[in-house]
């Protein structure tokens, strides 16, 4: 959860989005699979929340659950699941209500723009479609708005680009078009799912600067889905770390980077390449193993098999709850809950050094 109080003399800021006990399950031939398990978080107005973790941890399913983009006939939400946007619970919203919200109040930038953009329609047509559905602008006003948005995302010669097709643009320009489409109706919330993954480092930096600038211009709240902690450090205010469908730690960027309380968070930070930091064998630090299959989750801590600090039956047989740890931040770890002497190893000893790079 986020601390939305600025000072003792100011009233708390009401979160724009409140997710409570979100559980997302899928009907499959093997039975019902739980992909997201009891996830809760807040998103304040104008805030950027980074959701991080390896592939398969549940980041994208969480974002698509918020947008209700998962197939209704195959998806089951928990009975107590709530995704409150203002006064509307999106989990229980009708299809008509969701169509009005998607693209207008909550928009999404997808991971791969070449598959998200329709290859048989021009860029201008795809931008115009959003405006046609969600605004009262006439055809001339919509065209002006389309060109204005392309110019805003720094696409050169927008009058020409509106006539072109996605395959005629570079990867960076296609991503800019996706951002233009997402922000064309000035949404309250922007969900960005790995928006820079397919881009080179230079274009990545430009896209992040662009998103930051547009966030300030429109006061848009952003949910940033990523596995890149460098991106998180650049643009986010808070971080939520996920593992195997569950939240395992959350806090401000400074807290997470300089004082990680969960072994998985610490391992992610240690995996960031840093000049002069290698193991004795000359290799970069890595996390052994893989994220467990959701069909074969362990009895105890889901990270136990990969955790170098685990040395007790408690970790193997008892799943930890998400509750305040040593820094009063939510942590899902048995040994982050007691005093440092109770831990097998002090988890925070080298965290700040690891994050500094």
Image (cartoon, grey):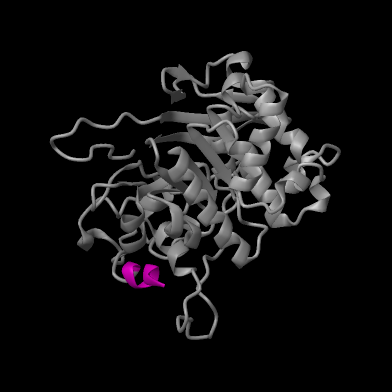
Can residue 82 be found in the magenta stretch?
A: no
Image: 290 above or below 38: below
In the rendered structure, the answer to whether residue 223 lies left or right of residue 56 reads: left
Q: Is residue 242 visible?
A: no
Of residue 167 and residue 81, the one placed in the foreground of this image is 167
- Quadrant housing the N terminus: top left
| Residue 270 drawn at (x, y percent) | 44, 69
Q: Is residue 42 visible?
A: yes
Q: Which residues are magenta?
A: 351-357
Left or right: 203 in relation to 338: right
**Which residue, as the protein is rendered here, is positioned at the far right?**
120
In the rendered image, the residue lying farthest to the left is 9
Q: Residue at x 13, y 35 (%)?
A: 9
Q: Is residue 93 left or right of residue 327?
A: right
Q: Going 27% across and 49% down the picture, which residue do you hit?
A: 325
Main secondary structure along the magenta-highlighted residues: helix
Q: Nearer the viewer, residue 154 or 176?
A: 154
Which is more toward the observer, 84 or 117? 117
Q: Position of residue 162 (x, y in %)?
A: 76, 42
Q: Residue at x 63, y 47 (%)?
A: 151
């Amino acid at each position: 959860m986020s601390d939305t109080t600025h000072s003792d003399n100011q009233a708390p800021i009401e979160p724009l989005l409140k997710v409570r006990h979100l559980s997302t399950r899928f009907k499959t031939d093997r039975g019902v699979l739980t992909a997201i398990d009891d996830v809760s978080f807040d998103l304040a107005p104008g805030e950027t929340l980074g959701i991080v973790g390896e592939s398969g941890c549940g980041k994208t399913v969480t974002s698509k659950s918020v947008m209700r983009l998962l197939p209704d006939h195959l998806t089951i939400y928990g009975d107590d699941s709530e995704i409150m946007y203002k006064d509307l619970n999106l989990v229980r919203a009708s299809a008509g209500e969701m169509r009005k919200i998607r693209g207008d109040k909550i928009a999404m930038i997808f991971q791969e723009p070449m598959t998200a953009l329709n290859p048989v329609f021009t860029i201008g047509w795809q931008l115009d479609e959003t405006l046609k559905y969600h605004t009262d602008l006439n055809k001339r006003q919509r065209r002006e708005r389309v060109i204005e948005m392309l110019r805003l995302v720094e696409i050169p010669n927008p009058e020409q680009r509106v006539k072109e097709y996605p395959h005629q643009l570079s990867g960076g320009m296609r991503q800019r078009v996706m951002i233009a489409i997402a922000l064309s109706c000035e949404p309250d919330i922007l969900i960005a799912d790995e928006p820079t993954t397919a881009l080179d480092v230079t274009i990545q930096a430009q896209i992040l600067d662009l998103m930051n600038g547009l966030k300030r211009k429109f006061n848009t709240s952003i949910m940033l889905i990523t596995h890149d902690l460098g991106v998180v450090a650049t643009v986010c205010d808070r971080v939520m770390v996920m593992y195997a469908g569950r939240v395992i730690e959350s806090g401000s960027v400074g807290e997470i980077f300089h004082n990680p309380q969960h072994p998985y968070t610490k391992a992610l930070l240690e995996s960031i390449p840093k000049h002069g930091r290698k193991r004795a064998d000359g290799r970069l630090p890595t996390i052994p193993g893989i994220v467990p299959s959701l069909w074969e989750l362990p009895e105890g801590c889901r990270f136990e098999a990969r955790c170098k600090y685990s040395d007790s039956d408690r970790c193997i047989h008892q799943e930890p709850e998400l509750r305040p740890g040593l820094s009063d931040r939510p942590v899902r770890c048995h040994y982050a809950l007691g005093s440092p002497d109770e831990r097998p190893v002090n988890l925070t000893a080298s965290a700040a050094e690891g994050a500094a790079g």
